[in-house]
Image (spheres, rainbow, N blue to C red):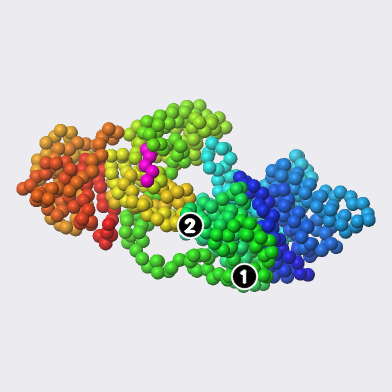
Amino acid sequence: MPCSLQTSSACCPGSRWPPPETTSTHSSRLAGIGYGITDEGVHVQDPFTGTGTFIVRLLQSGIIAPADLARKYTGELWANEYMLLAYYIAAVNIETTYQALVAEQQPDRPVDYVPFPGVTLTDTFQITEKGDRSDTSLIPVNNQRIEAQLAAPIKVIVGNPPYSAGQTSANDNNANLPYPTLDGRIAATYAAQSTATNKNNLYDSYIRAFRWATDRLGDQGVIAFVTNNGWLDGNTADGIRKTFQTEFSDIWVYNLRGNQRTAGERSRQEGGKVFGSGSRAGVAVLVAAKNPHQTGCHIHYHQVPDYQSREDKLDDITDATLTTTAWTTITPNTDGDWLNQRNPAFQTFTPIGLKDTREPTPRLFTLHSRGLATSRDAWCYNFSHKAVEANMSRMVDEYNLEATTCTGDESKLTTDPTRISWSRGLKADALRGRTHQFKPDRIYESLYRPFCHQNAYFDRPLNERVYRLESIFPTPTHDNTGFYVVGVGSAVPFSAVAIDCLPDLHVTGAGSGGQFFPRWTYERADSSAQDALPAPGDAIKPSSTTLTSPSTTSPPSPTSTCSAPDRRWSGSSTATRSRPTRPPASSTTPTNGPPSTTTPATSSTWSNVSPEFPSTPCRSWRTCLNFPFRKSGNRRRHCRS
């Protein structure tokens, strides 16, 4: 019997209720799998019902035949909600809607108020966890409904899953709950298929909903969700797309766009925000069908045009159906790209960098790193050097107090954001009783945003992630040069920024975490090399040895002598940063290596010319030996400035 399928939305934590127009995507049958919602035995579930919007609109739509309405209402419709107030509102909304529909069918007879037996107060993810047991002592009737729902053969799952990749601050004490069984399924499917390095976003609540719903359907059924659209072209989500291709027979995606986390012209092209002021995320309607009698996967895609207003988007989707929408068929490539498919020619190019420095594959840069991720920017960054010092010393004092008094009990830790900013790593240290020390010499000059230099506190114990930056900027007096490239799949347009100081994680804006490729890297010299360094004030005799090979790419050995007095590095914050300059034009200097014995250098600013960049001065060997780190050229000969 022909029928239509509506997709709806409930609530999105941190945003307002979505517009009702997003409930108007229809199909003539349940995605061509041979039955309709009104048919007997077709159970429908809204696992994140909020205030019951979706079930209400399903009852009002006319999809369910009048003769089937009572059967559907009393035994084949299910709705879950774990917020108590929303649960009560949903129950009242659904029950009054049903009563009104029955009254229309029999206007001459009184209508009894029938409670909706399919609504449950529960955590949808938790009740399907392996080994989960219900608490029968609290609400026995609720638990009976949960057991009945788990036994029902669900064929249609609809709704608006919550979007939550995690709490923004550990001070909130509101981290996403772990679901070992569900997360294990994500690890075995979406994460296993993904080529991304950081896969944390694959455990976002709406992606958990994808995994849960797919497994709940079994071999046959339909999912219809209103979700964040980041999974459509996100780099981390390639595993989701690849898995969808193997688990579904037909997929329809109506992309409403509206991602306002982008910037500039890209933001204007995204058009109006579908959720209004409630959310800046882009939105898409997903309808995915599992049909065991069909081979392969057919992907149908439609997106709203550029610059379309929110009102126009909602007007268009109000009348949209699976049969009348102008769908575009997508043929994914082997990399799991659906939109903006990559050019395979790029796979043949030499990579600019690889994460594994031991990997023998040629690359342009031996080492690269993400920028500094503090997880407490308000404390670690400031335009004032004194403010960073005052803020961090105060926070370290508070941290040490908490670490010595909490005795491993997280509930004893303060959550006052004016006293300390917690992160996962710092909280773990506190629970282990580890104390930390404030180090004034770890305040660096940093590039927080383009043309926005700030002072940053850079110290591993008090930064959540430092990546490989300690090999690039080991101390504030070690200068370096490189460029920061916007990350793959970033919300901001591609760009590259030249940087000569410590980069922040999001130099080009929030959501654009990229990579920093430095000109130099540093490694700590061994003890014998330290002994070879001149002591402060020692006179240094001119060397009788010169470097003559133009292909030399590494600094001289620690026993090479310098031509000017020098001093050991002591880690003092008062050390000055000197930038080398070219020797005067009248000087006679070799093209590579330290000055010859016939023209000893007397200026501490002398620098040789880099063999890799013949027109670019690099730091002198004197400067290289000035610190207990060896400077290594982080480049290849065919790389040019």
- The question of residue 229 being in magenta is answered with no
Q: Residue at x 50, y 40 (%)?
A: 424
Q: Residue at x 11, y 41 (%)?
A: 602
Q: Quadrant of the C terminus?
A: bottom left
Q: Residue at x 28, y 59 (%)?
A: 639
**Residue 278 placement (x, y as % from top left):** 61, 48
**Residue 242 placement (x, y as % from top left):** 54, 64
**Residue 540 placement (x, y as % from top left):** 11, 39
- The residue tagged 1 is 326
Q: Is residue 229 above or below residue 371?
A: below
- The residue tagged 2 is 265
Q: Quadrant of the N terminus?
A: bottom right
Amino acid under disc 2: Glu
Q: Earlier in the sequence, mark 2 or mark 1?
A: 2
In the drawing, does residue 212 fall left or right of residue 352?
right
Q: What's drawn in magenta, residue-wise? A: 451-459
Q: CA distance from mark 2 to mark 1?
A: 26 Å
Q: Residues within 10 Å of mark 1 (few under 14, many from 20)?
A: few
Amino acid under disc 1: Ala
Q: Is residue 285 above or below residue 627?
A: below
Front label number (2 vs 1) = 2
> As drawn, which residue projects farthest toward the left?
598
Q: Residue at x 85, y 50 (%)?
A: 114
In the drawing, does residue 242 fall left or right of residue 67?
left
> As drawn, which residue projects farthest toward the right?
108
Instruction: Give the dominant element type of the magenta stretch: helix, strand or loop.
Output: strand
